[in-house]
Amino acid sequence: MAASGTVARPYRRIATEEAWISAELLALYQKMLKEGFADDPGFDSLWRHYGLGTSERCIAVRERMLDLGARRIADMDAADIDMQILLVTSPGVQLLDAQTATALAAASNDQVSQAVQAHPDRFAALAAIAPQAPQAAAKELERAVTRLKLKGAVINSHTRGEYLDDRKFWPIFEAAEALDVPVYIHPNTPPADMIGPLLARGLDGAIYGFAVECGMHSFDDHGERRV
């Protein structure tokens, strides 16, 4: 049976990378942009326009990412989308100090789980975690899956230039394996020591930079980076 308001089809259309952001995290992003203490040119490039812009388009983008209810569902119906997989938008909590990031990840997971519970036929979600604190991230993943019924974790690629081939992050993968859930790696803009030539050419985002940056997580059989 098709979801309410969508076209009846012999299959379901599921959008698998649907960005959302909590009001608390958005406010923190805006504060970081205004005060210039993020110290991350990729974050500034990715967020300054839509995070602080006052145009109708910028405001609409922010409002849509904040919404986990009627407006998002109306947009889904208009696009014939049956279900969305919700992910905290890049860079998530990964620019923040470990304590703040861990707390905000948990709060975000509580919020998105409420949306999933309210609309189980329209939403599913992956949990936000804070790789800055791998053990805490593993515990939050377990909580999110077993108690909040989320489907796995999203990691918004590098965490201040650190990549997932570092063994310090293994507790996260061990938890995911034990829970039998996926870890979804969402692209991000390249870190400060990589972004220079891409930023200068306007290629730091989805056109090219996302793919280059996200590929840095790959490693060979000996645990050494290929790139």
Image: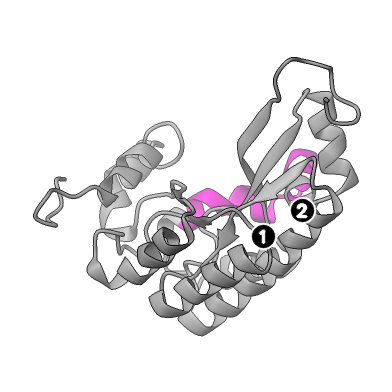
Mark 2 crowd level (few <14, some 14–19, many ≥20, 10 Å Cα) = many
Q: Can residue 159 be seen in this view?
A: no
**Residue sticking out furthest to the bottom:** 99
Can you say whether 183 is above or below 138 in the image?
above
What is the magenta range?
Answer: 43-62
Residue highlighted by disc 2: 116
Q: In which quarter of the image is residue 104?
A: bottom right
Density class for disc 1 (Cα within 10 Å; few <14, some 14-19, many ≥20) is: some
Q: Position of residue 153 (x, y in %)?
A: 52, 57
**Is 108 a magenta residue?**
no
In terms of depth relative to the viewer, which is nearer, 202 or 78? Answer: 78
Q: Which of 167 and 41 is in front in this view?
A: 167
Q: Residue at x 68, y 57 (%)?
A: 21
The answer to which of marks 1 and 2 sits earlier in the sequence is 2
Spot occupied by residue 64 in the image (x, y as percentages of width and height):
77, 45
Q: Visible in this render: residue 191?
A: yes
| Numbered circles on residues, count | 2
Give the x, y percent position of residue 81.
75, 28
**Residue 57 falls within the magenta-colored stretch:** yes
Placement of the C terminus among the 4 image quadrants: top left
Q: Residue at x 12, y 55 (%)?
A: 224
Q: Do the residues labelled 1 and 2 touch (CB within 8 Å)?
A: yes
Find residue 90 and report its horizontal and vertical position in percent: 53, 53
Identify residue type, mark 2.
Answer: Val
Say whether residue 31 is left or right of residue 6: left
Which mark, residue 149? 1
The residue sitting at 77% across, 24% down in the picture is: 79
Q: Residue at x 84, y 18 (%)?
A: 7
The residue under label 1 is which amino acid type? Lys
